[in-house]
Image (spheres, helix red, strand yellow):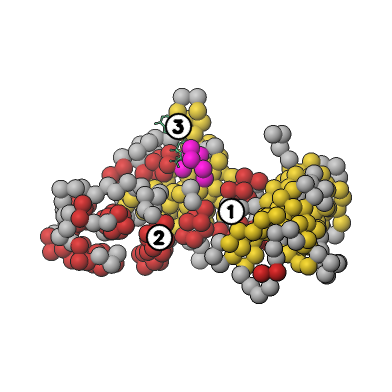
């Protein structure tokens, strides 16, 4: 059965003066989906969210929620729950009063409000703070209450604008798990704005990657990571080794890139067409390269180099290997034999050509 579309953006555009901040944004969000808008600061994430929320009017295009055109409809008529980066609780109200606020506005009977507030505080695992004031809560607790307040009205759409940004690393992770659980339990269609790629990969059914107001790619976390539509998407999501070079020819769906650093990278073309002699940039992620004994497995070793530096990072070790004139980062899982790899040692590097991404080289 085809899923219902909850939110639709059609050629949405926003400009501030001569600055095109959102350009030709098309998107269909299915009922119950969690979608992230991901991109660097200034790419237009918040502006897009604010247009969906009704705080800003688009200059062009259409926004629909549940099949109804929303252009010009005020925010309070859009049936939304919202959570922002800064804690937006009313300081003079208790937690219970804060959470009840939206229900009171909707003129819900008192007994029903009480019941709903109790249930939602249980859902966010904070029933014991109902009578406290926001200043008596930790940052993480305040954000959970802000989420409870957004969810209690059972909105048709939940909008989250960097809700975890003000929390320290550990709390961020905790609340990220919590958001995932809450999304699963409530099934509410959610749009999540973030500049943190890991957060987006972890939480989303699909990710919209934005750059300078343009959609670069819309896809599942798997697609975004493994089949990036552009160099921007690949480099924005995680660490990667950048190796400029020239296409030396192709065979069997694969190709060889002569890197400027002086070695040859074998890569799969992944449906892209490149011509021999074309200037390209090849990328391979640190965790996709394996180190071997320099002389061993001669047919699988694709380059040789010298270890220059090792950094211990807990569950893995990051290794800088000099290959030709490039420093290639290799990430190794903690495993037996790792102690054999020391600075100054000659090693072989292997990779699967499928893990090498090649993009046209842009003028710098
Ligand atoms: P961040 O993560 O830093 O919040 P963002 O991707 O959410 O970034 P937006 O806040 O949507 O980016 O801003 C996009 C661009 O629009 C920026 O260049 C910003 O300076 C500009 N901008 C946003 N609001 C206004 C405004 N009211 N007037 C003029 N320019 C604005």
Foreground pick, 346 / 167: 346
Q: Which residues are magenta?
A: 39-45
Q: How many marks?
A: 3
C-alpha separation, residue under disc 3 versus residue under disc 2: 40 Å
Q: Where does residue 154 sit, x and y in percent of width and height?
A: 30, 58
Question: Of the residues tagged 1 and 3, which is closer to the observer?
Answer: 1
Name the foreground residue: 247 vs 191. 247
Q: Tell me which numbered mark, 3 or 2, is placed earlier along the sequence.
A: 3
Disc 1 is placed on an element classified as: loop
Residue that label 3 marks = 59
From the viewer's perspective, tell me whether residue 322 is left or right of residue 141: right
Question: x, y percentage for residue 307?
Answer: 72, 58
Quadrant in which ligand 1 is drawn:
top left
- Where does the image place residue 54, in percent across and percent down from the top left? 35, 40
Is 119 positioned to the left or the right of 160 in the image? left
Which residue is found at the position 65% from the left and 52% from the top? 240
Residue under label 1: 238
Residue denoted by label 2: 170
Residue 40 visible in image: yes
Q: Residue at x 62, y 68 (%)?
A: 333
């Amino acid at each position: 059965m085809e899923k219902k579309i909850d939110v639709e953006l059609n050629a949405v555009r926003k400009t501030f003066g001569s600055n095109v901040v959102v350009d030709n944004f098309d998107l269909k969000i299915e009922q119950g989906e969690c979608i992230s808008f991901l991109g660097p600061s200034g790419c237009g994430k918040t502006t897009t969210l604010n247009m969906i929320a009704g705080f800003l009017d688009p200059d062009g295009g259409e926004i629909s929620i549940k099949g109804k055109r929303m252009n010009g409809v005020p925010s309070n008529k859009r049936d939304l729950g919202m959570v922002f980066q800064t804690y937006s609780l009313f300081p003079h109200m208790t937690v219970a009063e804060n959470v009840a606020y939206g229900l009171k506005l909707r003129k819900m009977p008192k007994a029903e409000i009480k019941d709903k507030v109790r249930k939602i505080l249980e859902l966010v695992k904070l029933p014991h703070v109902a009578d406290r004031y926001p200043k008596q809560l930790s940052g993480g607790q305040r954000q959970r209450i802000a989420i409870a307040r957004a969810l209690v009205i059972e909105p048709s759409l939940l909008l989250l604008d960097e809700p975890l940004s003000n929390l320290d690393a550990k709390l961020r992770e905790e609340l990220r798990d919590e958001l995932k659980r809450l999304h699963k339990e409530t099934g509410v269609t959610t749009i999540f704005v973030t500049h943190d790629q890991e957060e987006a990969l972890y939480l989303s059914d699909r990710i919209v990657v934005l750059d300078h107001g343009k959609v670069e790619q819309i896809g599942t976390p798997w697609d975004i990571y493994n089949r990036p539509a552009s160099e921007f998407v690949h480099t924005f999501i995680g660490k990667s080794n950048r190796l400029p070079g020239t296409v030396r020819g192709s065979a069997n769906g694969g190709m060889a890139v002569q890197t400027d650093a002086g070695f040859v990278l074998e890569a799969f073309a992944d449906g892209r067409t490149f011509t021999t002699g074309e200037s390209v940039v090849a990328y391979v992620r640190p965790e996709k390269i394996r180190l071997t004994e320099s002389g061993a497995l001669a047919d699988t070793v694709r380059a040789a180099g010298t270890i220059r530096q090792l950094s211990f990072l807990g569950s893995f070790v990051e290794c800088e290997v000099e290959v030709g004139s490039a420093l290639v980062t290799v990430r190794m899982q903690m495993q037996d034999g790792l102690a054999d790899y020391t600075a100054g040692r000659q090693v072989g590097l292997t990779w699967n050509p499928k893990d090498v991404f090649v993009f046209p080289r842009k003028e710098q």
